[in-house]
Amino acid sequence: MEGFDPAINYGPNDAGISAVTIILGIVGLIAISWLFGKIYAQVAKIFESNNKNDS
């Protein structure tokens, strides 16, 4: 009788992770990064306009 090797007998689908979940996760990370960049740009623009008004 051979020993049980989980690396051979289990794959990503056994944990409930499908290709759709992986793709949605990657797209979500890209979307969050883009959103953070947009928010950062708006905040930077507000601070720049405040600095111009102060001088």
Image (cartoon, grey):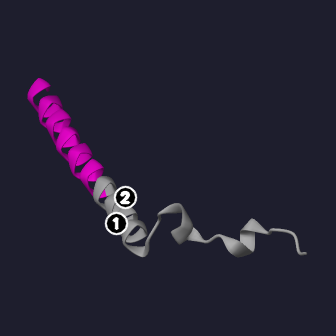
Instruction: Work out whether 45 lies above or below 18.
Output: above
* Residue type, numbered disc 2: Leu
29 relative position to 13: left or right: left
Answer few, some or many: residues within 10 Å of disc 1's Cα (few below 14, many 20 plus, some between 14 and 19). Answer: few
Marks 2 and 1, how far apart in space? 9 Å
How far from the left and from the top, in percent, is residue 40? Answer: 26, 44
Q: Secondary structure at mark 1?
A: helix
Secondary structure beneath disc 2?
helix
Q: Quadrant of the N terminus?
A: bottom right
Which residue in the rendered view is the most extreme toward the top? 54
In the picture as drawn, the residue positioned furthest to the front comes out as 1
Viewer-proximal residue, 23 or 15?
15
Q: Is residue 2 left or right of residue 49?
A: right
Quarter location, residue 33: bottom left
From this view, report whether residue 19 is shown above or below residue 32: below
Q: Nearer the viewer, residue 45 or 26?
A: 26
Left or right: where 7 falls relative to 46: right
Q: Which mark is residue 29?
A: 2
Q: Nearer the viewer, residue 52 or 50?
A: 50
Q: Which residues are magenta?
A: 34-55
**Residue at the far right in the pictured view:** 1
Q: How many marks?
A: 2
Q: Quadrant of the C terminus?
A: top left
Residue flagged by tag 1: what amino acid is it?
Leu
Q: Residue at x 61, y 72 (%)?
A: 11
At x 13%, y 30%, the residue is: 50
- Measuring from the top left, give residue 36's x and y in whole percent: 29, 48
Task: Please report the residue visible at 79 percent of the width from the left and 69 percent of the height from the top.
Answer: 5
35 part of magenta stretch: yes
Residue 39 x, y percent position in the rendering: 22, 45
Q: Which residue is mark 1?
A: 24
* 32 sits left or right of 48 in the view: right
